[in-house]
């Protein structure tokens, strides 16, 4: 398990290659990457706040839970905080399993939990000002499937 | 004495990211009621409990949770990670 | 859309970074990578045969179908043929969408169709000899969900 | 004259990856019956139709498909890509 909560940008490609290279025995690797959306070319930026201490524990607990539910070879979660520009990667999840169904399910599970149960809060900064992103009902509903 | 932390718009409404609070409240809900009576900014931050979440010693918890032995409390809106 | 059927190895990380960099407006990128499994350290290799001409058309049709079903910003499919060693990447799929549900669903859809409807055949080469990989009932069943 | 292609173990059993076949068969199934009667290797390759797939002009098709105007036919086992 590799969990990192960091202010610095991360190299999605390099992390994906390193992850795929170390999961001997796995036949399937799934990655999810969340990006700051460029809304129609409008200059977008995002400020992400988190709860140091609780964040790392909450994410580690989610990964542990995923490992009890699916047959995983390995999993990785990287999540940034601080100020991010449009197009930048906010976070990534990677899962590796023998078969694709486990890798996909675990990645979706981790995403659903990260969205609504890891202590991060996003503030969108645009020409109109700054606004805290509201939690979406669909995101809370998505947790019910697990 | 409990360390109380605030995040996102709860922090903005309270005006500080954390403070140490002296209280004899037995539960999270009792503390909220006590704080709301103290100052307007708490009333503003804790006005709509449906949009408030609480973590007790860094674990998501409920407003009914006991404060016995608790060292750290955090209030924040629903999380929006990922 | 980017579709490539090739004998040469591909750089998963470089392709993922390039894909994520060009999908302006997307908030979610999902990748799937299929690897040659190293079965308990036993030297594994794989020989992949395909049907030139039909392969490219079949994959393009799958991507088109995915684009009608989900709101996708872009999609990418790379699939190798020829001889591959244990641990090497066989293929990858990448999908980009505004929201994660579309990106995940489209990636799983493409994988299910690539598994059972794109004209590739795998032969496993091990110390015991060479054997054509049999189609799995689960893979055929997986198509029914779409 | 139809170009007939074989892949994977079908190719190995027939012994060639492709051949041009002169036939008056009206459907894929009729051609299969004709070939099976011709030589043992066809009988071996086409013995179990449940594990055989056919593409007509590079589109997955059925054994009942007509051969009228068809240029290319391919026989192979269930696909195992991905």
Image (spheres, coloured by chain):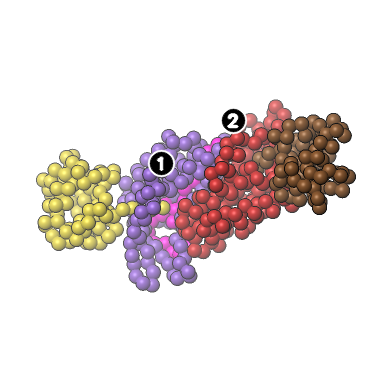
Chain colours: A purple, B yellow, C red, D brown
In reply to whether residue B61 is colored magenta, the answer given is: no
Which label belongs to residue A146?
Answer: 1
Secondary structure of the residue carrying tag 2 is: loop
Q: Main secondary structure of the magenta part?
A: strand
Please say if C128 is above or below C121: above
| Extreme-top residue of the structure | C128
Alpha carbons under labels 2 and 1: distance apart: 31 Å
Which label belongs to residue C83?
Answer: none
The answer to whether the residue labelled 2 contacts the one labelled 1, judged by CB atoms less than 8 Å apart, is: no
Q: How many numbered circles are shown?
A: 2
Instruction: Give coordinates of residue B46: x percent, y percent.
Output: 20, 56
The residue lying toward the viewer, choosing from D49 and B50, is: D49
Which label belongs to residue C40?
Answer: 2
Report in which chain the residue with disc 2 lies: C
Range shown magenta? A79-98
* In this view, the mark in front (2 or 1): 1
Residue at position x 48%, y 59% in the image:
C98
Instruction: Give coordinates of residue A38: x percent, y percent.
Output: 47, 65
Secondary structure of the residue carrying tag 1 is: loop
Q: Quadrant of the C terminus of chain A?
A: top left
**Disc 1: CA contacts within 10 A as few (<14), some (14-19) or many (>=20):** few
Residue at position x 82%, y 40% in the image:
D31
Q: Quadrant of the N terminus of chain A?
A: top left
Instruction: Give coordinates of residue B13: x percent, y percent.
Output: 22, 61
């Amino acid at each position: 398990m590799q969990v990192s909560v960091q202010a610095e940008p991360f190299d999605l490609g390099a992390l994906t290659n390193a992850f795929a290279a170390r999961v001997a025995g796995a036949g399937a690797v799934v990655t999810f990457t969340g990006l700051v959306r460029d809304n129609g070319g409008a200059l977008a930026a995002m400020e992400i706040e988190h709860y140091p201490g609780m964040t790392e524990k909450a994410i580690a607990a989610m990964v542990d839970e995923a490992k009890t539910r699916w047959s995983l070879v390995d999993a990785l979660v990287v999540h940034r905080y601080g100020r991010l520009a449009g197009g930048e990667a906010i976070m990534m999840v990677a899962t590796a399993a023998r078969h694709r169904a486990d890798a996909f399910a675990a990645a979706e599970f981790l995403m659903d939990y990260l969205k609504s149960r890891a202590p991060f809060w996003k503030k969108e900064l645009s020409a109109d000002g700054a606004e805290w992103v509201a939690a979406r009902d669909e995101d809370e509903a998505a947790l019910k499937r697990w | 004495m409990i360390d109380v932390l605030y995040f996102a718009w709860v922090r903005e409404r309270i005006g500080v990211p954390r403070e140490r609070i002296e209280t004899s409240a037995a539960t999270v809900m009792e503390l909220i009621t006590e704080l709301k009576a103290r100052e307007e900014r708490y009333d503003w931050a804790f006005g709509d409990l449906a949009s408030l979440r609480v973590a007790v010693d860094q674990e998501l918890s409920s407003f009914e949770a006991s404060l016995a032995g608790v060292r750290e409390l955090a209030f924040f809106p629903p999380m929006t990670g990922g």
